[in-house]
Each structure stands twice: as structure tokens, then as C-alpha cells.
Image: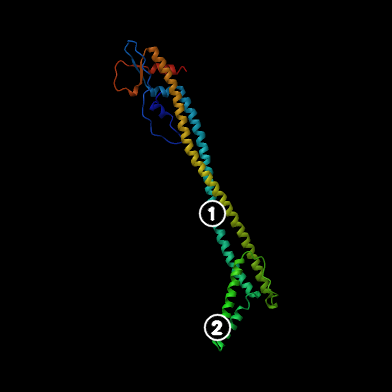
Amino acid sequence: MPLSGAAVGLLALAVLGPAAPPPARALELELREARGERGTIGYIDMEQVFKEFPKTREAKEAFDLEVKKTKEELQKKRVEVSKLRSQIGELEAELEPQKEKLKDLKSSLAAKTIVAQIARGSLRNVPQKLAEAETVQTQAESEADRQAAQKEAEGIRQGAEDEISKIIAEVPETAAEPQSGRPEPAASVKTSSSTAGLEDLRQQVQTTSSTVQSLEMQLALKRSGLEVKAAALAEFQAKIKEDLEGLEKRKIQIVLGKIYQIVREIAEEEGISVVVDKNAILYGQEAVDLTEKTLAKIKEL
């Protein structure tokens, strides 16, 4: 049995918005054999019958309830996605300053560690050794002596650079001051103060590094969760469109089926061969209007 365009339009989808209206069609009852008699044509106002049919209201109420539940579930999923995006933004805003702070702390620790190493002896003699090598190079009598002194100076410089690179690479893992022998008495107070400052810096680096790692882990988890929930939301939106359209169509079919049976009974009682929708009639003579009889009968249900 074909659907009435007016009927379909009455159960518009509340969640998904209006869809393009289907083509208008008449409710048609099959022609019976006239048995020698001329067939009689009847018509009904299908839109009026559909609107006033109690089953239409019941179907619409049931459909609206389902739409409401679906909207609530959809909104819940949207809130979850929005909440995750907000949390990710907050974590990112918190992480960036911590990363900058860690970078600055490491640079400061590296510089102070190098100064401490020089003061404690591992690089303390580098300037003196370089000066001696340059003096030998200047006073050398032969080319061979000058080249030897130059090579020695380059070796001293390279050794110092390697030592500094090693110190930087070990920051902030270096846990304590390097043991390079006893400090001179005159430098003991200064060295003790320097050590305390380095220990404080190392502690700050360790604490800030732990904070950065924790924030990065939280961000990774939130981003993974967002990806899953965003995909689930998109899938749910596509599914509810299909489900609600199918539900609407089934409910309309049920209502039209009941109207069809009533119109058929009236047509048989009145000896009507064909019943058409009033809105589909272009021209006709002696057609019988069955609208009021149909309305009276459906209200008895």
C-alpha cells in the first residue's frame, strides 16, 4: 500500500531536522469486478483522516518519546567529547610553562656545574696548561717543537671541551658533586655554598621533570580517549538517523494500514469500487465523499 505524503510529513524527525517531503500519493483500494454494474468512485480527505485518527496521535507520542531519549543520549555523548577537549586544553596550557621551566633549569644547572667543576679541580688547571703550551710554542727554536707545542695545546682544548660536554650530558642525572680531592681551606665556604645551590637546582630539575612526564602521560590518555569517543559519537549520529527514519516509516505504515482496513469496510458497505485521496482528484462526477463516515468509524476505535 503506498504512503500518503501528508501522513509522512506529520511525523517529522525532531532530532535530525526536516527531510525532503516524499511525493504525494493517494490511498487506493483495488478495483473489484463490477459484475455488470458500473463502478462507483469514492474519495476521502486523507490528511484530515490521518490527523484525527487516535492511532496517529499515539504513534506520534511514542515517536516523540523515542526522539527525546535519543536526543538525551546524543547530548550526553557530545558533553563527554566536549569535556575531554576542555581537559586536553587545560593540560596543554599547564604543560608548556613546565617544559619551559625545565629547559631553563637544566641550562642553569649545566652552567653552574661547569663552574663548580672548574673550582673543584677537574678543569682548574686548563688555563695554566694552555698558557704553558702557548709559551713553549712561542719560544720553540724548531718547527718540530712548535708543532709539538701546538698539538699539545689543541689536545688540552679538546680535553676541556670533552669534559664540559660530558658534564652537560650528565645533567640532571648527576646526583652529587664530583669527588676531586679536598678543597683548599680558603675556598671551603664558597664551595659549600656552591654545592648547596647545585643540590637545590638538581632537586628542582627532578621535581619539574616528574611534573612534565606526568602531564604528558595524562595528555596522551586524554587524546586517546577523545579519539575513541569522537569516533563513537560520529557512528552514533549516523546510526540514529537511520534508526529514527526506519521507526517513523514503520509507525506510519501501521497507522495507514488501520485506515486502509476501515476505508475498505466502508467502501464495501457503500458499494464503492475505487477510493482516492481528495487532494489527488483533478476532475470527477458523482464521486462519493467518504471522509465523514471514515472519521466517525475511526473515532469508535
Q: Seen in the image, is 30 located left or right of residue 141?
A: left
Residue at 57% across, 49% down: 221
- Residue 147's disc is 2
Estimate the x, y position of residue 103 in percent, counting from the top left.
56, 63
User: Looking at this view, is 245 or 10 the one in front?
Assistant: 245
Q: Residue furthest bottom?
A: 141
- Residue 92's disc is 1
Q: Seen in the image, is 211 located left or right of residue 66?
A: right
The quarter of the displayed image where residue 259 is located: top left
The quarter of the displayed image where residue 135 is located: bottom right
Q: Secondary structure at mark 1?
A: helix
Which of label 2 and label 1 is nearer to you? 2
The quarter of the displayed image where residue 264 is located: top left
Residue type at the position of mark 2: Gln
Estimate the x, y position of residue 268 in percent, counting from the top left.
39, 13
- Residue 270's disc is none
Instruction: Answer with mark 2 or mark 1, whichever residue precedes in sequence.
Output: 1
Query: Do the residues bearing badges 2 and 1 touch, measured as CB atoms within 8 Å?
Result: no
Colour scheme in the image? rainbow
Say above or below: 297 vs 180.
above
Figure disc tally: 2
Q: Seen in the image, is 133 located left or right of residue 291?
A: right
Estimate the x, y position of residue 238 in percent, counting from the top left.
47, 38
